[in-house]
Amino acid sequence: MAPPAKITPTPDRAGAPRASAAPVLAAVAAVLCLAGLGLTLVLGGAAFPEVIPGLPDAGDAVRWGLPLSKAVMETAGVLTIGALLLAVVLLPSDKGRLSRQAVGYVHAATWSALAWAAGAVGTLYFQASEFLARPLGRVSVDEVTAYAGSVSGGIALMFVILLTTGILLFGRTVTGATGALWLLVLALAATTPPALTGHSASAGAHELAVTGLALHVITISVWTGGLALLTFHAMRARGDAVETAAARFSRLALWAYVGVAISGLASALARIESLDALLRTEYGLIILVKVVLFAVLGAFGYLHREFALKGLDGAAKAPGWPARRRLLFLRIAAVEVLVMALVIGVSVGLGRTAPPPPLDSRVDPAALILGFPVPPPMDAANLLTLWRPDLFFIMLVVVAGGLYAAGVVRLVRRGDSWPAGRAVAFTAGLLTIVAVQLSGFATYAMVLFSTHMIQHMVLSMLTPILLVLGAPVTLALRALHPVKRRGDRGPREWLNLFLNSRYSKLVTHPAVATPLFILSPYALYFTPLFPTLMNDHLGHLFMGVHFLVTGFLFYWVIVGIDPAPRKMPYLLRILLLLLAMGFHAFFGISIMMQSAPIAMDYYGQFDVPWLDGLAEDQYAGGGVAWALGEIPTLLVMLALVVQWSRDDEKQERRRERHARRDGSDDADLDAYNAYLAELDRRNKAISGAEAPAAEEKTAQEKAAGEKAGDD
């Protein structure tokens, strides 16, 4: 284990606040968090609900203890993420080694992870008590264990406990930036399981509610935790260390702010169906309170960027100026942290408040599963109008397209060029995602196997080809700037590290990428996995992401332009492509020959009056798999031929350059001619030696013939 790098901050003590102010700030933040929680519980009606006599009830201890334990869990999670973010992203490293300060923050993250796990355990007990409608003292450990293993809310908390325990155990030994990054990924993943259950899972618009709340929790944790730990760091460190961390967080906070806004809007739209529900229900009023607090935080962010951060940037150059600007920065940051603490309390209370009932009170069995009623017969008009706004794929398309466009603009502004064909290919790839994941195809794919197969084939065989031909990694490497500090890691350095990592070499190896691509459909559709995934929105999301990733890896190996850990001969690429084509053709034929419908338990739930039959629809789906597997293969074959030809031309130009460097423009031709001359000389020498022997043999044969004639 490498020792931590020693990066000494610049001393600057005059007039700066002391670190002793941190406990006071933490205490005030805790009070505001509890105040926001209590007021929200009272306003939303969760604090004093109407208890019907004779019905079982968990009691007031559970009613108040559950939101308190959730507040502890979420606050500890925010602090864990903030400490790891500060250590691995905001503070500079030295050739992959964390500074001593950064290692200290990683160790601090393990303690907050312990509090996170403890809060999750407490929440698990309170939720089990509420689920069983019995006071906490009358719930046994066996009942809590059963709840944790069978109910979605309990399973989610068990994942949180597992991940936070991993952070606690492994975090004590981490001194490298890569290890700390993996801990940060674990921490971000630990925030999502509770967000995927509760109100979001039961909301009508699953695509908005589930993804929206998960994204909301992640972005607000990064924003709040990063600012809280940056404020604490600014109270302790001095000079360039604070300036660098603050500048990096400013850019990250802007992305987090936008993510919080978009995800919060999506979550609200999934639960509030009218303006009246927003203005006249407790749930709607609490959301309005969050909107106001969010606007206040945006104003503080503007003050940071326009005043405090600009002052810090020039702090090292003006005597007396650093302390005053640092004080301004800390004052704004401290108030912002307090507002964020209030937001956390309000958010926990909002999670305990029942959302408004739907406008249409009729119970539709299909809508309970799909999130919408069975659509009308499929035609061109319905495919263009019955859109399904899935927030995950909306964000994927918008962020990927925006980053790609920003990279091209940066290259053009500095005088470089970028092939228009690559930009067109990448844009077309994103548009195919929009077509099959957000349009009417996404609606009908929920009830028709054939339409689902169109989704699958496009996402796995057409979209990846276009994205790979867009060369996004090459664009990123050219557009991203290297970090200013030698040995530090920024986005470009992290990308380079990933491309050359053992993991990248493993997943892009033909022996791994090819089986993943060609065998995944068999493992999905011919096992009980397919109906299981179809019954849940997260299952749909998993399938879509899996199709994209496996297709991207395979076609990156086959036809990729971006730098890869290994380059394969073009002949081997063609053979792998033909192998994949054969497997996909057999897959489509196998589906067409199935005697029983696939996922009968799932598709049989829906009454689709305009459908001829499940078997006929499945037969059409097999034909789609067969046909759509052939067309992209031909496109890739054409691209391979073009790449092979260009590679030969490049090799020829390289040989010509070597020849000119050797002093002869025709060095290769001269060498070849010399080789032919040598062969000719050897042939003549052999012919000259064999001629006398041949003449003597001819004379002997002639004499033998004459003698035979005389006889």
Image (cartoon, grey):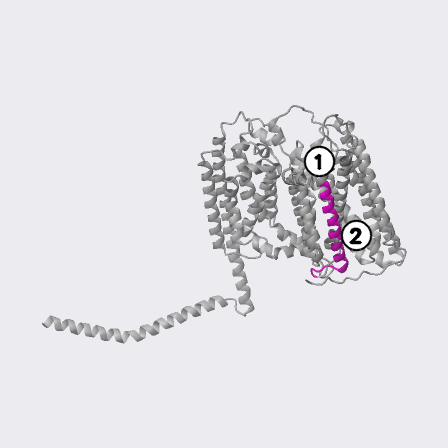
Magenta-drawn segment: 95-123
The reply to whether residue 700 is visible in this rendering is yes
Q: Does the magenta stretch include residue 112?
A: yes
* Residue position marked by numbered label 1 in the rendering: 267
Q: Furthest-left residue in view?
A: 711
The amino acid pointed to by label 2 is Ala
- Residue 572: give x, y in percent of width and height: 48, 54
For the point 38% across and 72% down, which residue is it? 681
- Given residues 495 and 473, the one toward you in this image is 495
Q: Is residue 627 magenta?
A: no
Q: In this view, does 44 lie to the left or right of 374?
A: right
- Given residues 121 and 461, the one toward you in this image is 121
Q: Main secondary structure of the magenta part?
A: helix
* Residue position marked by numbered label 2 in the rendering: 246
Quarter of the figure that contains the N terminus: bottom right
- Residue 79: give x, y in percent of width and height: 76, 48
Packing grade of label 2 (10 A; few <14, some 14-19, many >=20) is: many
- Residue 341: give x, y in percent of width and height: 80, 43
Circles 2 and 1: CB atoms closer than 8 Å: no
Q: What element carries label 1?
A: helix
For the point 63% across and 55% down, which residue is it? 498
The amino acid pointed to by label 1 is Ser
Which numbered disc, 2 or 1, marks the residue that appears first in the sequence? Answer: 2
